[in-house]
Amino acid sequence: MTKAVSGFSKLSKEEKINWIAETHFSNPIEAKKIIQQYWNENSSLQKLHDEFIENTITNFYLPLGVAPNFTINGKNYTIPFAVEESSVVAAASKSAKFWGTRGGFKTTIINTEKIGQVHFIYKGDKQKLETFFNTIKPKFFTETESITKNMQKRGGGILDIELRDKTTNLENYYQLHATFETKDSMGANFINSCLEQFAKTLKEEAQEYEGFTSEEKEITVVMSILSNYVPNCLVRAEVSCKIAELAEKHIENPQEFAEKFVQAVRIAEIEPYRAVTHNKGIMNGIDAVVIATGNDFRAVEAVVHAYASRNGKYSSLSHAKIEDGVFTFWMEIPLALGTVGGLTSLHPLVKIALEMLGKPSAQELMQIVAVAGLAQNFAALRSLTTTGIQQGHMKMHLMNILNQFNATEEERKEVVKYFEKNTVSHSAVVEYLEKIRLV
């Protein structure tokens, strides 16, 4: 059993690594070697990475790949993907190529509203609280002017503040529900700073309000925090073409393919067990671009899955239809993203990724990310309804299996050639590798 360590955060990086290696590993020297081999040789760059989080011991790498030839609203993009799962980039690239000759992807920003809340307890008359709120509402705006000044110059700021009565759910519980426009920044620090000032104003003004009794003046602020649920920060991405234009190598009967594809999406709309996997495929594409561009993939995951449950049952994020001989596949999802602030100005590879995308605005990045998700979903559903998902996925996974068993270059060539005409599975690859090693 590991003993507790005191003052770990105050130890130097080397001391932290020594403690970890000697406490948790049977071979401390080998453990330290593995940890240190991922350090960047550029000491200033390594220091930058070390300071992103606390108690840093090394870097954890993800491959950064690219999918070229994406046409979005008539503009060409090469999209960066930071992801470890095989076939994600290949699938996105195939979708980009497929739809590039069929009009490309179309996107629309529906709204960019973000949300923050002050949660508080008030033990008093509801009508008096409403009157009080309406009286002091202008002060919420005036007393945050120093915070909102720069954001307002960029066209953003506080959109509105509402008083919400939540007492039917929790006794004496109310909210200040505020909406914001944060332009090209994700806006978390901006929103939270505004909310904390709202809370301060709320408490101070309550103490001075003559319409309250002494008990009603004692408003208790529980917390002030932005919400990652942003159902009104929406982007739509879609593709469409005449059914006959769907024809290609694996789609000999376009009508049959379109009907089967629509059925596959409808199953995901009504069956949560399928919907979770269906939406996970969408997030394969979305998360990879979100990470590559220095955004918060945890926040994106949380809001997207909450949005998928907004009607009381978890359902597909994407939809498909056949109408008047035209196949349409689309998705509307909430995405709160930023292209300024945070890691976007600190991480060198994030800067590279954003420049690769043409230094997009937050709204443009929303559209690119949504397209990456829709492209990934289309590729998965095309495989599922034609050749099956495993054929392409396992061939991409082949290299991982060969790496696991330290295959030589000659062995790799022979194994790859063999599985061009044979079904790939982990056991089949291992069996064939052992066979050629016995020769």
Image (spheres, helix red, strand yellow):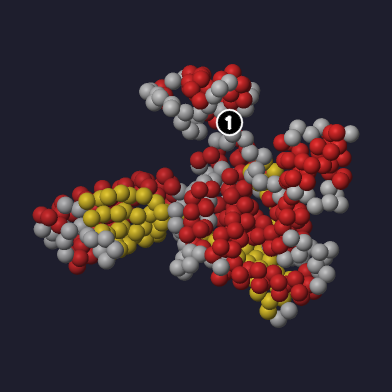
Name the residue furthest right: 439
Q: Residue at x 46, y 65 (%)?
A: 310
Q: Residue at x 77, y 41 (%)?
A: 430
In the foreground, 408 or 154: 408
In the shown orientation, is residue 142 left or right of residue 210?
Answer: right
Name the residue furthest bottom: 324
In the displayed structure, 315 sits above or below 10; it is below
Residue 89 visible in the shown view: no
In the foreground, 342 or 279: 279
Where does the C terminus fall, quadrant-wise?
A: top right
Q: Residue at x 71, y 81 (%)?
A: 324
In the foreground, 58 or 133: 58
Residue 45 visible in the shown view: yes
Q: Residue at x 76, y 65 (%)?
A: 386
- The residue wearing badge 1 is 59
Where does the N terminus fall, quadrant-wise?
A: top left
Q: Quadrant of residue 28?
A: top right
Give the amino acid at mark 1: Asn
Where disc 1 sits, the SS reads loop
Q: Residues within 10 Å of mark 1 (few under 14, many from 20)?
A: some
Q: Residue 81: horizontal and vertical position, in percent? A: 66, 46
Q: Residue 259: horizontal and vertical position, in percent? A: 71, 74
Q: Residue 391: horizontal and vertical position, in percent? A: 76, 55
In the foreground, 68 or 34: 34
Q: Residue 53: horizontal and vertical position, in percent? A: 48, 33
In the shown orientation, is residue 307 left or right of residue 205?
Answer: right
Q: Quadrant of residue 429?
A: top right
